[in-house]
Image (spheres, rainbow, N blue to C red):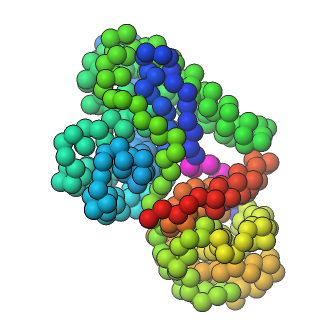
């Protein structure tokens, strides 16, 4: 059975300013690759000037959770260490439940996601001053880039017409479709070339969206976003990685992610009967050899799909045959699978030195030459080179 699903799920990219004096305040920081789902009504397509906010998909991870963990944003909001600690507690209360929604379609994701973001903002309003909350909203809108224009509050304050809103929706959809085509094009490599193409599409889309706005609206948008803040160094943080609860451990005693602080950890889900998984295993073994055990760790989670794969002795036998010498948790009861809201075999997660999930990849590594192993290997090296932050 083919259990492959390849999708790069977390990437950071900074776009260039749109045009001097118009959207130069908009330094784009893309926090998620999930497309913004936009519904254009048949009435609008027929030229009837009525508009309802388009059906958006709430980005996961949401920019606000990454921003609230950024020292740069802390300085901008002038947070005391005590206030920053309270904010971290508020973020941790919603980021894991929010992250678990990442693979759901908009109709199942949005309602719960909106509730979680509202709860976070409610708690923030009890911690931050009105001025700090206003500035935080500006920073979140800056981080979301041109997508923020269709935020209900932003759209209302810009007084977008129905025609403008629908045109912007169409431009964003077209841009996302082009980005999806580039991502799925296995002929485009290395990844740096693919990233450059995606960056160019984003910049082009930004310029087209800016052209839809009137000069007055562009000025209003600049005022609404406030003074620009450099977000290029903000780390995209999904959530604190859930602890791994496996029934049986192979090659080691129980592994606790909390005991791996200071190391970059790879957590990969697989099944020994999954061909896509088996073809990825040599790359994990190579990472063990490439990276110093003092700064790197890898954990396999074997979650069976078939009855045959539930045989732990078979798991042990297959692991030895594949040369897997690192810890493996046998997840027959799907405890880890559910805690991570995983949905496909294989999946690879990168966890930073502070225990936060930073990148993940669904599917076989290097499937049809997609260069994903190299991409993740470079991200591991990048995370190892980061300084750990409290």
Q: Nearer the viewer, residue 384 or 182?
A: 384
Residue 109 visible within the image: no
Residue shown at the point (47%, 40%) measured from the top left? 231
Residue shown at the point (48%, 55%) measured from the top left? 237
Question: Is 5 in the magenta?
Answer: yes
Residue shown at the point (37%, 39%) measured from the top left? 140
Q: Quadrant of residue 240?
A: bottom left
In the displayed structure image, the side of residue 110 where residue 316 appears, left or right: right
User: What's the magenta region?
Assistant: 3-10
Residue 233 visible within the image: yes
In the displayed structure image, the side of residue 237 where residue 68 appears, left or right: left
Q: How many marks?
A: 0
Which secondary structure type mostly characterizes the magenta part of the structure?
loop
Q: Nearer the viewer, residue 6 or 190?
A: 190
Q: Is residue 203 above or below residue 185?
A: above
Residue 82 x/y as whole percent: 27, 62
Residue shown at the point (56%, 76%) measured from the top left? 260
Residue 182 x/y as whole percent: 67, 35
Residue 265 x/y as whole percent: 61, 69
Q: Quadrant of residue 386?
A: bottom right
User: The C terminus lies in which quarter of the figure?
Assistant: bottom left
User: The N terminus lies in which quarter of the figure?
Assistant: bottom right
Residue 215 x/y as whole percent: 37, 10
Q: Is residue 45 above or below residue 91?
A: above
Q: Quadrant of residue 268?
A: bottom right
Question: Is 28 in the magenta?
Answer: no
């Amino acid at each position: 059975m083919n259990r492959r699903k390849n999708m790069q799920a977390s990437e950071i990219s900074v776009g260039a300013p749109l045009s001097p004096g118009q959207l130069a305040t908009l330094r784009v920081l893309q926090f998620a690759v999930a497309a913004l789902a936009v519904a254009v009504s048949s009435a609008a397509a027929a030229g009837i000037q009525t508009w309802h906010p388009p059906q958006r998909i709430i980005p996961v991870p949401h920019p606000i959770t990454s921003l609230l963990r950024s020292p740069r944003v802390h300085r901008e909001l002038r947070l005391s260490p005590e206030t920053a600690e309270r904010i971290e507690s508020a973020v941790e209360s919603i980021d894991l439940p929010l992250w678990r929604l990442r693979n759901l379609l908009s109709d199942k994701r949005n309602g719960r996601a909106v509730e979680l973001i509202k709860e976070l903002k409610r708690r923030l309003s009890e911690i931050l001053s009105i001025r700090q909350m206003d500035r935080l909203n500006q920073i979140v809108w800056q981080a979301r880039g041109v997508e923020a224009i269709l935020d209900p509050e932003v759209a209302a304050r810009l007084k977008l017409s129905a025609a403008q809103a629908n045109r912007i929706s169409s431009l964003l959809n077209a841009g996302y479709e082009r980005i999806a085509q580039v991502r799925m094009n296995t002929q485009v490599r290395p990844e740096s070339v693919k990233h450059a193409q995606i960056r160019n599409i984003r910049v082009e889309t930004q310029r087209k969206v800016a052209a839809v706005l009137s000069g007055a609206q562009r000025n209003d948008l600049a005022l609404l976003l406030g003074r620009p803040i450099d977000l290029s160094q903000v780390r995209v943080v999904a959530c604190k990685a859930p602890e791994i609860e496996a029934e049986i451990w192979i090659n080691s005693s129980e592994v606790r992610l909390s005991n791996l602080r200071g190391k970059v950890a790879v957590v990969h889900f697989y099944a020994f009967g999954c061909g896509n998984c088996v073809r990825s295993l040599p790359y994990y073994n190579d990472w063990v050899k490439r990276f110093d055990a003092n700064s790197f760790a890898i954990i396999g989670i074997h979650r069976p799909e078939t009855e045959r794969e539930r045989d732990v002795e078979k798991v042990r036998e297959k692991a030895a045959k594949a040369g897997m010498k690192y810890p493996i948790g046998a997840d027959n009861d799907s405890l880890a699978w559910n805690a991570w809201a995983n949905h496909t075999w294989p999946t690879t997660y990168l966890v930073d030195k502070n225990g936060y999930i930073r990148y993940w990849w669904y599917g076989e590594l290097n499937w049809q030459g997609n260069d994903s192993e190299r991409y993740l290997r470079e991200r591991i090296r990048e995370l190892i080179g980061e300084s750990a932050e409290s």
